[in-house]
Image (cartoon, helix red, strand yellow):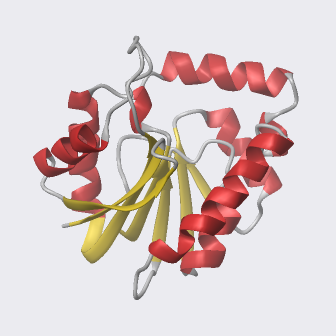
Amino acid sequence: MNKKFWLGRYTSLKKNGIVGSMSYGDEFQERVDIFFAEMKHELKISKCSTLVDFGCGTGKYAKLLKEHFKPKKYIGLDIIDFVIEDNKNKLPGFDFKVYDGTIPKCDVIFLASLFQHMDDKEVVTTLKKMKTSLSKDGKLFIIDFIGKAANNSYTYYRDVKEHGQLITQSGFSGKVAYMNNNDIAVMECTK
């Protein structure tokens, strides 16, 4: 992951008082809430002891994930330490940690809008790590933007087929569980 990019982005958000508020603004948070309400019925798992929110950022999904999956333990991972500290202060009772390259054993891994900031090789490497961390019947849920745009050093837009190829290369089986206006997809992956 491009730590320099994220450090710059979160530093800017923090200056504007946005990181500490756990939201990118009311309009964005409203879209997140509506989107999650629309697609949460597609996110199914029979039991969830531990859920990892990989790339948790400001913790915007933490409460929604805990409410929906009812894990005994929620762990939010991110690479930016001050974002993790802000999350710990804003959401007591949730476990937030700085990502050190390891992913704890878990039943569900959730990530949103993260792979668009990773090249293909990094996506496959990360997915392989996730696969070893998931329980036998565990699931990985990926929410990402779908489509083509000018790729640059920190944004890689992929279509559904390209996402599927990366998921398969990493050893997962995957399916599109939900698609919103053909621009955001939820992919459900199993071992």
Number of dots carrying numbers: 0
In the rendered image, the residue lying farthest to the bottom is 46
What percent of the width, then of the height, locates residue 60?
Answer: 69, 51
What residue is at 29 percent from the left and 54 percent from the top? 130
Q: Position of residue 31 (x, y in %)?
A: 71, 49
Q: Quadrant of the N terminus?
A: top left
Residue at the spot 78% in from the left edge and 51% down from the top edge? 30
Q: Quadrant of residue 147?
A: top left
The residue at the point 23 percent across, 60 percent down is 174
Of 25 and 122, nearer the camera is 25
**Which quadrant is home to the C terminus?**
bottom left
Decide: is 176 above or below 41: above
Asked whether residue 105 appears in the rendered view, the answer is no
* Residue 37 is at least partly visible in this image: yes
In the image shown, does 1 or 153 lie closer to the viewer? 153
Image position of 129 (left or right of 108): left
Residue 26, quarter of picture: top right
- Residue 175 in the image: x percent, y percent? 27, 61
Q: Is residue 146 above or below residue 141?
A: above
**Residue 65: % across, % down:** 60, 68
In this view, 119 is above or below 173? above
Task: From the viewer's side, name the closer residue of 148 and 120.
Answer: 148
Q: What residue do we see at 46% from left, 73% from top?
A: 42
Occupied quadrant, residue 134: bottom left
